[in-house]
Image (tube, rainbow, N blue to C red):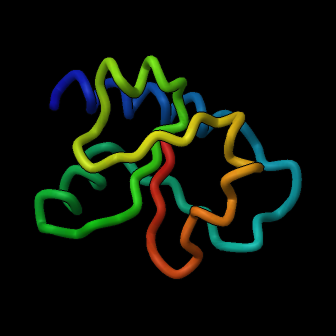
Amino acid sequence: MRRGAMIALAGAVLLGAAAPAAPPDHPVQYIKVDELKGMLDRGARPDVIDVRTTGEYDEVHIRGARSMPLRSIPQRIAEIPKDRLVVFY
């Protein structure tokens, strides 16, 4: 999990540097890798979405995460729940 945590941290840093083009329809909060790991360790089941390429996802990913490459999000937006915690990395 250490390698996965490092990848998640790198993704969070990259995504954290990007500013949204417009205010989101739903609140956006940034969490740290330790916070996500703590949630998962306590049995919480957020929807964890890996936005890297499919090849990167296949190589290593957070257990339980699903692959949704960043470029595919506009076409798959309906798959993202609006009523529970969603974590993108």
The x and y percentages for residue 2 are 17, 27
As displayed, is residue 52 above or below residue 68?
Answer: above
32 displayed left or right of 86: left
Q: Quadrant of residue 5?
A: top left
45 displayed left or right of 79: left
Give the quadrant of the N terminus: top left
As displayed, is residue 26 above or below residue 41?
Answer: below
Residue at screen point 68% across, 40% down:
72
Q: Residue furthest bottom?
A: 83
Give 61 or 12, whichever is nearer the viewer: 61
72 displayed left or right of 83: right
Residue at screen point 12% across, 58% down:
41
The x and y percentages for residue 39 are 23, 62
Residue at screen point 44% across, 69% down:
85
- Count of marks placed on residues: 0
The x and y percentages for residue 75 are 74, 50
Residue at screen point 22% across, 50% down:
37
